[in-house]
Image: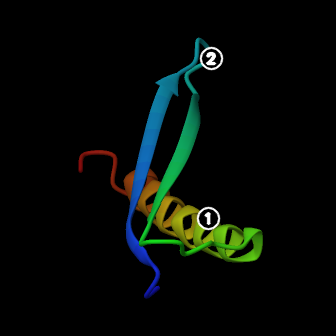
Amino acid sequence: MAGLESITYHIKIVPTEDGGCICKNRSIYHAKGGFELSEEKIKERKEKAMAIFKAIEAYLQANPEA
């Protein structure tokens, strides 16, 4: 997007006692000048980031020695 300087993603995966995990995801949007990002665009970006995370998760589950 032309109005964004960058997007920073922070992903923290915390193990749970039952052997699972909790994933915490935070996105920080750095806009150029007076650019305003709509909630709709933020939602679209969040969905794309989640799709990438899900693909990585599926790969790691299929390849535990990776």
Can you give x and y, in whole percent of width and height, for residue 55 in the image? 48, 66
Can you give x and y, in whole percent of width and height, for residue 33 in the image? 44, 72
Numbered mark located on residue 12 in the image: none
Mark closer to the chain start, 1 or 2: 2
- The colour scheme of the drawn protein is rainbow
In this orientation, which residue lies closer to the viewer: 59 or 49? 49
In this orientation, which residue lies closer to the viewer: 28 or 45? 28
Closer mark to the observer between disc 1 and disc 2: 1
Can you give x and y, in whole percent of width and height, for residue 35 in the image? 54, 75
- Left or right of 5 in this view: 41: right
On the image, numbered disc 1 is attached to which residue? Answer: 46
Q: Residue at x 40, y 61 (%)?
A: 59
Furthest residue toward front: 34
- Left or right of 14 in this view: 50: right
Q: In the rendered image of this protein, does residue 20 appear above or below residue 6?
A: above
- Amino acid under label 1? Lys
- Left or right of 55 in this view: 66: left
Can you give x and y, in whole percent of width and height, for residue 51 in the image? 56, 69
Q: In the rendered image of this protein, does residue 35 appear above or below residue 16?
A: below
Numbered mark located on residue 18 in the image: 2
In this orientation, which residue lies closer to the viewer: 29 or 22? 29
In this orientation, which residue lies closer to the viewer: 32 or 22? 32
Q: Assign a secondary structure to mark 1.
A: helix
Q: Which residue is drawn at 62% across and 17% down?
A: 18
Q: Residue at x 42, y 60 (%)?
A: 56
Crowding around mark 2 (Cα neighbors within 10 Å: few <14, some 14 to 19, many 20+) is few
